């Protein structure tokens, strides 16, 4: 029995040896290639560089017929779509780069770190009164804007000629923006010599009606005298007359209540037309009211530079004495 088993093992080895040798030859290797000729085995030392350049059968990292991960493909599509949407989206109008050129699309206050310088001069021909106001605005944050205004003086008819009165009225202002439609204004105008002081408050409302129309109201709604009289920035002669009245113990206005409304029509990207109305009750007396009507043309060369003009009446009841023409320019940086 043991003899038969031994013969079976020997027969199996005899058959398997040629088959194994043939398999090695089919793979391009032979026993002689790994021998030194004397029958001794040769040890191969192969570095990675010795393998040469081998073409990667799957250069993309996976076989061509491999299934693509659907979640990975969906993520790639979403990322590409988000990038395209961001590239095509219009700039934020509350940022410096995206500040609108259209007057009707501009926010109530300047965006953070933007500054604006504005100068306007108003001419009333009969009697002659020419005055100017320099205004500086700065966006502290996207919710807070501060402003400084200075009345540069007035050239007016003095009976036997014209007389220039230097400006001594200044005002400081702050506006807090609650949202894109509503802000609260507080302004403090004061006169340097003799000293006079007042306070002006107003809720600023803006309502957009499509791309072409905007309604604005609330600015300078209530003014209250705090010391002596209420200074005005655009008429230095009027301030001097009020100061003289106070020195003579005469009664002067305690303030005023004002209801303004502006309608902005955006004709095209650069040109806008504004109709302005205001009912003002001086000394808080409803029998002492004045209705002002003015029209403004504003032309924006860029979103940083505007020029314009305004024409109208500060009081229709005395239209002849209150007719005036105003020119202005604005520069933003």
Image: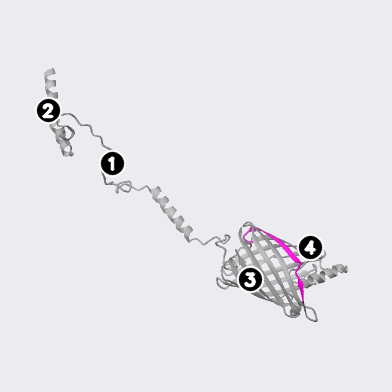
Of circles 2 and 3, the one toward us is 3
Q: Position of residue 162 (x, y in %)?
A: 77, 79
Q: 293 or 152, which lies in front?
A: 152
| Residue on which disc 2 sits | 14
| Residue on which disc 4 sits | 197
Residue at coordinates 14% horizontally, 27% vertically from top-left? 13
Q: Which mark is residue 49?
A: 1
Q: Position of residue 67 (x, y in %)?
A: 33, 47
Ranked by sequence position, the earlier of labels 2 and 3 is: 2
Ranked by sequence position, the earlier of labels 2 and 4 is: 2
Q: 200 or 303, which lies in front?
A: 303
Of circles 3 and 1, the one toward us is 1
Residue 208 to residue 48: above or below: below
State which region is magenta.
163-181
Element type at mark 4:
strand
Relative placement, left or right, of 85 versus 197 is left
Of circles 2 and 1, the one toward us is 1
Mark 2 and mark 1: Cα distance apart in space: 40 Å
Relative placement, left or right, of 49 versus 133 is left
What residue occupies the far right of the structure in this picture? 249
Label 4 neighbourhood size at 10 Å, few (<14), some (14-19), many (20+)? many
Quadrant of res 206: bottom right
Can residue 83 be seen in the rendering of this structure? yes
Asked whether residue 168 is drawn in magenta, I would say: yes
| Residue on which disc 3 sits | 329
Of circles 1 and 4, the one toward us is 1
Q: Position of residue 207 (x, y in %)?
A: 62, 65
């Amino acid at each position: 029995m043991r003899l038969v088993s031994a013969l079976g093992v020997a027969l199996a080895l005899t058959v398997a040896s040629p088959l194994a040798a043939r398999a090695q030859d089919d793979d391009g290797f032979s026993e002689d290639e790994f021998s030194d000729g004397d029958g001794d085995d040769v040890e191969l030392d192969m570095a990675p560089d010795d393998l040469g350049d081998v073409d990667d059968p799957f250069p993309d990292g996976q076989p061509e017929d491999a299934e693509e991960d659907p979640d990975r493909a969906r993520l790639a599509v979403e990322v590409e779509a988000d990038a395209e949407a961001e590239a095509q989206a219009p700039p934020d109008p509350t940022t410096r780069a995206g500040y609108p050129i259209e007057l009707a699309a501009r926010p109530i206050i300047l965006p953070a770190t933007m500054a604006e310088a504005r100068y306007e001069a108003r001419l009333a021909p009969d009697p002659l009164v020419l005055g100017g106001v320099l205004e500086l605005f700065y966006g502290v944050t996207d919710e807070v804007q501060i402003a400084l205004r200075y009345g540069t003086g007035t050239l007016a008819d003095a009976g036997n000629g014209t007389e220039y009165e230097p400006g001594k009225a200044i005002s400081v202002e702050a506006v807090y923006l609650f949202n894109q439609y509503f802000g609260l204004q507080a302004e403090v105008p004061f006169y340097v010599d003799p000293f006079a002081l007042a306070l002006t408050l107003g809720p600023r409302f803006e309502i957009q009606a499509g791309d072409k129309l905007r309604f604005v109201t609330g600015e300078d709604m209530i003014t209250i005298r705090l010391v002596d009289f209420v200074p005005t920035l655009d008429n230095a002669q009027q301030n001097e007359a009020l100061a003289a009245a106070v020195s003579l113990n005469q009664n002067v206005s305690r303030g005023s209540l004002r209801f303004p409304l502006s309608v902005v029509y955006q004709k095209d990207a650069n040109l806008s037309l504004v109709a302005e109305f205001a009912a003002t009750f001086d000394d808080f007396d409803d029998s002492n009211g004045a209705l002002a009507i003015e029209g403004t043309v504003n032309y924006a060369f860029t979103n940083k530079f505007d020029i314009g003009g305004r024409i109208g009446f500060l009081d229709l009841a005395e239209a002849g004495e209150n007719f005036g023409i105003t020119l202005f320019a604005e520069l933003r940086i």
